[in-house]
Image (cartoon, grey):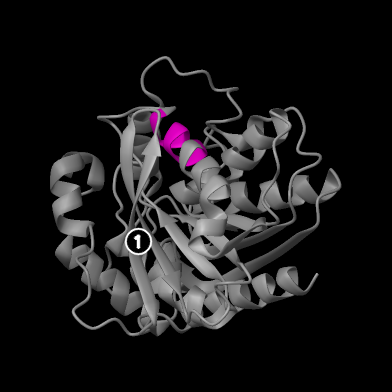
Amino acid sequence: MTDHTPACWDLLDDQAKAAARMIAYVVPKPLRELGPEQARALLNSAPAAEPSTPLDHVEQLTVPTRAGAIRARLYRADDTGRDGGNPALAYLHGGGFVLGTLDGADEVCRAIAAGSGWTVVSLDYRLAPENRYPAALEDCLDAYAWLTRTAPELGIDPERIAIGGDSAGGNLAAALCLHRRDADLHLPVTQVLVYPAVDGTFTAPSWSEFADAPMLTAADARWCWDAYVGEGHRGDDHLAAPMRAESLRGLPPALILTAEVDPIRDDAEAYAARLRREGVTVSLTRYPGVFHGFFTEIGVFAQAKQAVDEVCLHLREVARA
């Protein structure tokens, strides 16, 4: 490490330090200086030639929404249980509302499908700043509603559908649960939130402590948030920032995972604490030595496998219940 390396990097393990150096090499400027198009060109993942988790069934889907069709991808470890209706996880990729694709979440969705026995349906959504709030949320709400209606045709049990996502996807998953609760709609059986962005105030200590963390700095996170909500946004809109909800009561049980070296960490953990105080069953795990984005990097971080295993165990327990 050099004299210019941020102090918080000392908390990273060797794998994470190596990954952080590689990111700094590949992405020479902050995201906010690159802008959306160049950032996407550098960071959006291409599909793997040979996935590390082969599956018997991967299907490309087109999902209707109020704004037009979006893409989705269905993953099933095997088709033996299709007739009976598998439980399913609707998964929303991360990327700060500005980046991210189905391909970027491909490996983690494969791993969850293989490890849990659940069908995983990865949902795309419109990105900012071209499509500001609530465009992405509306896509997710419509896609989830479509999934519940179409579930039997897809071999999915409509009574056992969960929602999950990482980073911006975690925000959208949490907001979806709030929207469906407020509208008195059938709720997901559980919510899996991986370092979710749940607050737009940027006041928790981790925003200062890890301001220069790898992958996501505090300044870049603010840039992503502004790209999503736009100028003059309402800071108390709980469907943009779920922590702003007047109440979190009545929401689905939650599994929340965080990374130690991440500006978002304290917000996500505060959300977990508040859910628990307001009567929601919550399991919270902080993964040490890693930074924001580790969860989807299968094969790069040992903690990614541990976190996916935890998600799979959680889903198996939900299915048994």
Q: Residue at x 50, y 58 (%)?
A: 153
The chief SS type of the magenta part is helix
Q: Which residues are magenta?
A: 135-141
Q: Given the image, on which type of amino acid does mark 1 rest?
A: Pro
- Magenta residue check for 158: no
Question: Residue 191 at x, y = what percent?
Answer: 64, 55
> In the rendered image, which residue does mark 1 sit on?
214
Question: Residue 240 at x, y = what percent?
Answer: 52, 31
Whether residue 195 is visible to the viewer of this picture, yes or no, is: no
Residue 207 versus residue 297 in the image, above or below: above
Viewer-proximal residue among 271 and 312: 312
Q: Residue at x 19, y 50 (%)?
A: 40
Tell whether 202 sits left or right of 255.
left
Res 214 quadrant in image? bottom left
Query: Which image quadrant: the C terminus?
Result: bottom right
Viewer-proximal residue among 79 and 242: 79
Q: Residue at x 66, y 36 (%)?
A: 180
Residue 138 versus residue 39 in the image, above or below: above
- Magenta residue check for 138: yes
Query: Which image quadrant: the N terminus?
Result: bottom left
Task: Tally the marks.
Answer: 1
